[in-house]
Image (tube, coloured by chain):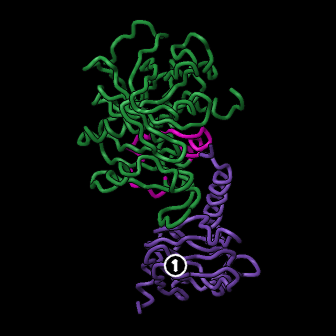
């Protein structure tokens, strides 16, 4: 269970323990609260608001293991003012943290199901906690399939972890890149193309998708074509979040607030909205 | 060399031809032969006569195009249970891309000239074959369109 938050708008100072460069523009922070033994429980799929003092705040998914609440892990892509300022921070420096917020992946309700994870780009980060949870409770699930698409081989996140997962006998990891470079000998094409041949039973599977909205939409189409009903698909939506607790309406998505009602939604709840421009 | 009967079995098991009428499978087995392409060998080259339609059983073929400054660029890879090549379907029946094996690749090659003749002679066969090709072409067009969006660009 998550511990209650005293003041949801008040950031807590966390020290950066380590910074790992994942790709040219993506990095992973390991954060720790200065109070020893402080627990930062979260559910896979939830996010925190990270505050770079004097610059601003940004919503970042938690990408660590919820079974290790002492370690707070965030993988971030440096694309805007705040995230670029974050990328310049060094171990030992302090960052503000509010959270965790939002509705996570309903993974604990899916026991006995095949688990199909479809993700692209940095979308793997919010799904990594789900994979940790599934693999820690491996016997409770059917087949576990990770389908991951990246722009180029150099943009693949968590390479060592993916290699480790690929080496397991109880998990299928299929990776594709949109553009091949160098000595890449793997699959080239969009991630949706991996779905038709992926080893899962569509009648007993649940899919979890995170990535650009168009990719999610076409992934659901491909899953449906395989026979997996859209009622058993969950997606994580991304919107510019400000308050993160449903006060400001900044992340309003049709009748929903992504921060409070999401970021994870059953696909059927957002299906109609995905076809509307500028929701 | 495998007997026609064995090739027929391989064709009938291929995902692309699933549900095809046995008499049509028999027709194709008359002009089918096994094909093995070793790692880094070319299955076909751009500009050459598209004389085969390949049903891949295992392995991986990279569809490549030569970029003036970047050398060969892989557009797509096709693996087990995929069909490779439709240049034989439309004039001038020349390969439009290179096809290079990324790993030892085994499959069945259907003689394209005889395929076209069989389609012309038996329209039902032609319809059955094309009704399998059209979804493959549509899927690959859709994938190419998504690829063009460069979804993960910064």
Q: Residue lying furthest bottom in this view?
A: B1
x, y percent for residue B153: 62, 46
Q: Say which residue label 1 marks.
A: B25
Q: At 58% from the left edge and 56% from the top edge, which residue is drawn?
A: A178
Whether the magenta-drawn stretch holds residue A214 is answered as yes
Q: At 44% from the left edge and 33% from the top edge, which residue is drawn?
A: A90
The answer to whether any part of residue B124 appears in the image is no
Question: Image quadrant of residue B69?
Answer: bottom right
The answer to whether any part of residue B128 appears in the image is yes
Residue A242 drawn above or below residue A7: below
Depth check, front residue: A271 or B129: A271
Residue A114 drawn above or below residue B42: above
In the figure, the shade used to draw chain A is: green
The chain under label 1 reads B
x, y percent for residue B68: 71, 71
Left or right for B38, reference B131: left
Q: Which residues are magenta?
A: A195-221
Whether the magenta-drawn stretch holds residue B32 is answered as no
Quadrant of the image containing the N terminus of chain A: top left
Residue A279 drawn above or below residue B153: above
Q: At 53% from the left edge and 88% from the top edge, which residue is drawn?
A: B30
Depth check, front residue: B127 or A56: A56
Mark 1 lies on a secondary structure that is: helix
Question: Image quadrant of residue A205?
Answer: top left
Left or right for A172, reference A82: left
Q: Which chain is purple?
A: B
Quadrant of the image containing the C terminus of chain A: top right
Q: At 58% from the left edge and 76% from the top edge, which residue is drawn?
A: B99
x, y percent for residue A15: 38, 24
Depth check, front residue: A244 or A206: A244
Depth check, front residue: A178 or A48: A48
x, y percent for residue A276: 69, 31
């Amino acid at each position: 269970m998550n511990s209650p938050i005293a003041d949801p708008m008040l950031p807590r100072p966390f020290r950066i323990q380590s910074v790992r460069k994942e790709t040219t523009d993506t990095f992973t922070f390991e954060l720790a609260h200065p109070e020893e033994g402080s627990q930062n429980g979260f559910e896979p799929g939830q996010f925190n608001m990270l505050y770079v003092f004097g610059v601003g705040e940004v919503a970042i998914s938690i990408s660590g293991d919820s079974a290790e609440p002492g370690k707070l892990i965030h993988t971030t892509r440096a694309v805007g003012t705040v995230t670029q300022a974050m990328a310049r921070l060094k171990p030992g420096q302090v960052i503000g943290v509010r959270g965790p917020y939002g509705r996570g992946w309903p993974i604990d309700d899916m026991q006995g199901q095949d688990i199909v994870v479809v993700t692209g780009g940095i979308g793997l980060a919010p799904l990594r906690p789900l994979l940790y949870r599934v693999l820690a409770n491996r016997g409770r699930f059917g087949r576990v399939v990770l389908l991951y698409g990246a722009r180029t081989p150099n943009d693949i996140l968590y390479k060592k972890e993916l290699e480790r997962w690929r080496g397991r006998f109880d998990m299928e990891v299929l990776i594709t890149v949109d553009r091949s470079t160098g000595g890449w000998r793997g699959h080239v094409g969009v991630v949706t193309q991996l779905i038709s041949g992926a080893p899962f039973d569509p009648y007993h599977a649940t899919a979890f998708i995170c990535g650009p909205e168009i990719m999610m939409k076409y992934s659901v189409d491909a899953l449906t074509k395989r026979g997996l009903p859209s009622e058993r698909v969950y997606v994580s939506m991304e919107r510019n979040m400000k308050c993160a607790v449903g006060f400001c309406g900044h992340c309003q998505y049709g009748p929903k607030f992504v921060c409070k009602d999401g970021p994870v939604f059953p696909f059927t709840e957002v299906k109609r909205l995905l076809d509307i421009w500028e929701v | 060399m495998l007997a026609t009967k064995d090739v027929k079995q391989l064709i009938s098991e291929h995902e692309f031809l699933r549900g095809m009428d046995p008499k049509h499978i028999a027709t194709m087995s008359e002009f089918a032969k096994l094909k093995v392409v070793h790692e880094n060998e070319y299955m076909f080259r751009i500009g050459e006569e598209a004389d085969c339609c390949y049903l891949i059983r295992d392995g991986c073929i990279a569809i490549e195009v030569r970029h003036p400054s970047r050398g060969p660029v892989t557009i797509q890879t096709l693996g087990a249970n995929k069909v490779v090549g439709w240049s034989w379907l439309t004039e001038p029946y020349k390969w439009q891309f290179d096809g290079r094996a990324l790993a030892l690749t085994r499959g069945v090659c259907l003689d394209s000239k005889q395929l076209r003749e069989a389609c012309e002679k038996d329209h039902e066969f032609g319809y059955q074959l094309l009704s399998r090709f059209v979804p493959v072409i549509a899927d690959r067009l859709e994938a190419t369109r998504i690829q063009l969006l460069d979804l993960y660009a910064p």
